Amino acid sequence: MFGVNLYKAYSKGAIKVLSIVALMLNLLPWHTWAQMPKNVLVAYQYAQYGFHCRIDFFEDYTFVYKQSSKLGSTKSTGNWRFVKDTFKLFNYQIPWRILSVTERKADTINGKSVVKVVTAKDSTTAEDVYDFPVWVNNNCKNRISTSQTGLAIFNTINITDISIDYNEYKVKDTASNYFVLTISCFPIYSSPGELQWKYWKKEGKVIHPIECGHIIPNLTLVEEQ
């Protein structure tokens, strides 16, 4: 009456174990698939004079950029898309970004425009950013470094966009001539530098970074075969 049916007990235990094993076997392919590396669609690299950089473009529209020199190594990851003949990189790490911009019309400024750059120390105070390059209207050949009070003065009253390293801002009111840019942190340039070229033009089996609207001819990344 109080005896134990060892066969039934064994059978139940065996069934339970076999069920667990079956479940693990069913999950194994999914686990293996999840651990598999992503497929590289195309890769480009450059190596010369102790400098090496490489971009892997993956089929899921992500990319990995690696750069190394005697100063050290950096790595950036993000997303990409290909438009006409150019790779556009986005959603990758940058050392600082524009948080907000205040635009206004200052009647005391005659024939000039002023860009002031600050970084927010807290919710109520800001710190002037000095010796920081700013350019307007995509004219990156006319970079002006901010003064000790964070000011960059331009001899134009028609500003459509404002640019800094890694970021740009489209002006909302072109009648404005005084702008205050608040960036996320005080900019400190590190060595080695981080990825700063958003656009890469494809020419046959090579790509070149684009800067100031022009390709950098002496930096050619060759497609890996």
Image: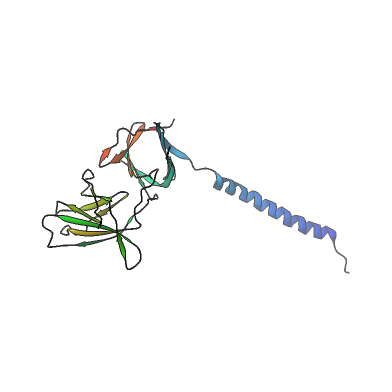
Quadrant of res 214: top left
Identify the residue at image location x=84%, y=59%.
6
Quadrant of res 148: bottom left
Identify the residue at image location x=73%, y=57%.
16
Give the percent coordinates (x, y) of residue 12: 77, 59
Give the percent coordinates (x, y) of residue 143: 23, 47
- Looking at the picture, the colour scheme in use is rainbow
Q: Is residue 224 left or right of residue 175?
A: right
Compared to residue 28, the image places residue 6 above or below, namely: below
Quadrant of res 7: bottom right
Identify the residue at image location x=21%, y=45%.
142
Q: Is the C terminus in the top left, top right, bottom left or bottom right quadrant?
A: top left
Residue in front for this viewpoint, 143 or 92? 143
Give the percent coordinates (x, y) of residue 92: 39, 49
Residue in front for this viewpoint, 179 or 188? 188
Identify the residue at image location x=32%, y=49%.
166
Give the percent coordinates (x, y) of residue 176: 17, 59
Residue in front for this viewpoint, 159 or 4? 159
Q: Is residue 220 left or right of residue 139?
A: right
Q: Is the N terminus in the top left, top right, bottom left or bottom right quadrant?
A: bottom right
Quick one: which residue is furthest to the left in this view?
110
Compared to residue 205, the image places residue 192 above or below, namely: below
- The count of marks equals 0
Q: Is residue 149 left or right of residue 59?
A: left
